[in-house]
Amino acid sequence: MSELYFFDTYAFFEIINGNLNYKKYEEVNVITTVFNLAELNYGLKKEKDEKSANEITEKYRAFLVEVTLDDVKEAMSLKIKNKQMSIPDVIGYIIAKKYNAKFLTGDKEFKDKHNVEFVK
């Protein structure tokens, strides 16, 4: 069985844009949250037409996992200590930990964090 990865928004964009450093992650088991897909959809709508943005975002629906209030509270405690991190990113980091998934990102704020696969 393949390793489980949490894709943050950065990872989605790198894969969509064809970054070869992310090629190997196209076939792994993936989870993400609705917050990351919201960021993805917003970013796509700034670059593409609404229909295309929605179709691309919809392709990742199957990767969604639930976020509980306890997850949010734990994530906001992390955010208090790491103000530069976005709310979707800290929630995602906590969800990755909860599911024993590697947190895949190229966001510099996560470069030296535990359980992060940092790829530019």
Image (cartoon, rainbow, N blue to C red):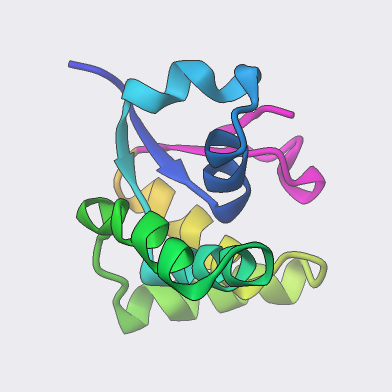
| Residue at image point 78% right, 50% down | 109
In this rendering, position of residue 79 left or right of residue 93: right
Q: Does the magenta stretch include residue 107?
A: yes
* Residue 29 position in % (x across, y down): 27, 31
Left or right: 17, with 80 as reference point: left
- Residue 71: x and y in percent read 38, 72
Q: Would you identify the image quadrant in which residue 88 lies?
A: bottom right
* Rendered residue at 53%/40% (across/down): 16
Q: In this view, does 109 lie above or below 40?
A: above
Height in image: 22 above or below 66? Answer: above
> Relative to residue 103, is residue 81 drawn left or right?
right
Span shown in magenta:
101-120
> Splitting the image into 4 quarters, where does residue 44 fall?
bottom right
- Looking at the picture, does residue 109 appear above or below residue 42? above
At which x and y percent is residue 13?
59, 46
Q: Which residue is drawn at 74% across and 46% down?
A: 107
Choose top left, top right, bottom left or bottom right for residue 66.
bottom left
Report the quarter where the C terminus lies.
top right
The quadrant of the picture occupied by the N terminus is: top left
Residue positioned 60% across, 63% down in the render: 48
Q: Is residue 8 magenta?
A: no
How many tags in the picture?
0
